[in-house]
Image (tube, helix red, strand yellow):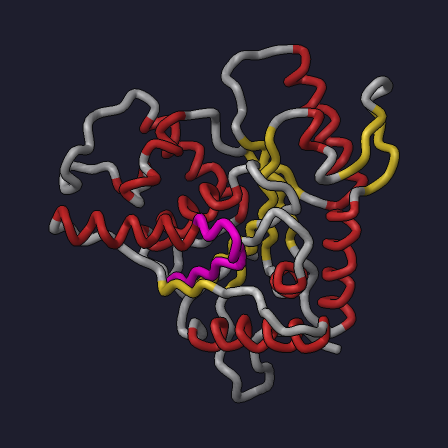
Amino acid sequence: MDGSLFHHGPDAPRPPYVIVVGNEKGGTGKSTTAVHLIVALLRAGYAVGSIDLDARQSTLTRYFANRQQFAADAGVDLPMPRHHHIERSQATTRAAAEAEERKRLRAACEDLIGCHFIVIDTPGSDAFSSRLAHENADTLLTPLNDSFLDIDIIAHIDRERREVVAPSAYTKMVWEQNNRRVMAGRPPIDWVVMRNRLTHIEARNKREIAGLMERLARRIGFRLAPGFGERVIYRELFLKGLTVLDLAEEVPGAAPNPSRTAARREIAALLETIGLSESHDAVPA
């Protein structure tokens, strides 16, 4: 069964490019990554839709609620995505719950059909809606904390020998959803793993992780992207719903911050790795 969330055919409108921010572990910076990606796309002039599938945490939804409130209180105009929050079904059977969640996610995507991009934030656990989102990902962006512990998201590692033992359950799920896309005649998922919360101190452990990630990329089939550093500025703006891309003279209270320029460069580097075009009619190659 083709799990596409969009109608296809000669008369169907061109669907938005879907970027899914996902893995099955909490605390890796998925929502922070999604927010900065969305705001960067908005400020580049794209029409952006956003979908929050993490019904339990709802971090992305709360971020944009804070953003809307700040804009109203400060009297400033901040770009906003067209946002949807998808609740988990309370149906009593698995089949009924999956059918309801599929219907909700498809309705959200159909509402966002006029956007250039849809960015989907997923929960840090295995869920049907998350698997469906992964199947529809043109680009899958997986934030990964820069530690041997978090590499376990991608593959099981022999920590003594620093060798790959087997792919993780999450990796197997991504492969499965990718196979479903290909069998339905759609392009494969462009899987990008970003090393997140990088420290700024060169160390042996950091070099070993870099080498291991490069080997994993070749073996498992993903591209590596530079992630975001361990910067307080990424977290301290949450209550205002702001990002480092919003910190300009027109936003009250935006005091100069020495890490702002570096953070902007990190976001720009991520966008470049994904392959975003300057043209509003184009999508990543």
Q: Which residue: 39% across, 59% down? A: 279
Question: Which residue shows up at 52% across the image and 34% down it?
Answer: 227
Question: Which residue is depicted at the point 49% across and 68% down?
Answer: 16
Would you place residue 47 above or below residue 113 in this image?
Answer: above
Highlighted range, magenta: 48-59
Residue 24, image x and y in percent?
66, 46
- Residue drawn at 79 percent across, 43 percent down: 168
Is 1 magenta? The answer is no
User: Which quarter of the picture shows residue 146?
Assistant: top right
The number of numbered discs placed on residues in the rendered structure image is 0
Above or below, 184 against 41 in this view is below
Decide whether residue 53 is among the magenta residues.
yes
Give the percent coordinates (x, y) of residue 275. Answer: 52, 49
Image quarter in which the C terminus is found:
bottom right
Is residue 58 rendered to the left or right of residue 90? left
Indicate left or right for 140 with 268 as reference.
right
Pick the residue in front: 219 or 205: 205
Quarter of the image with the N terminus is: bottom right
In the rendered image, the residue lying farthest to the left is 75
Residue farthest bottom in this picture: 11
Residue 258 in which image quadrant = top left
Task: Please provide percent x and percent y for residue 91.
Answer: 63, 73
Residue 211 location in percent, x, y? Answer: 72, 24
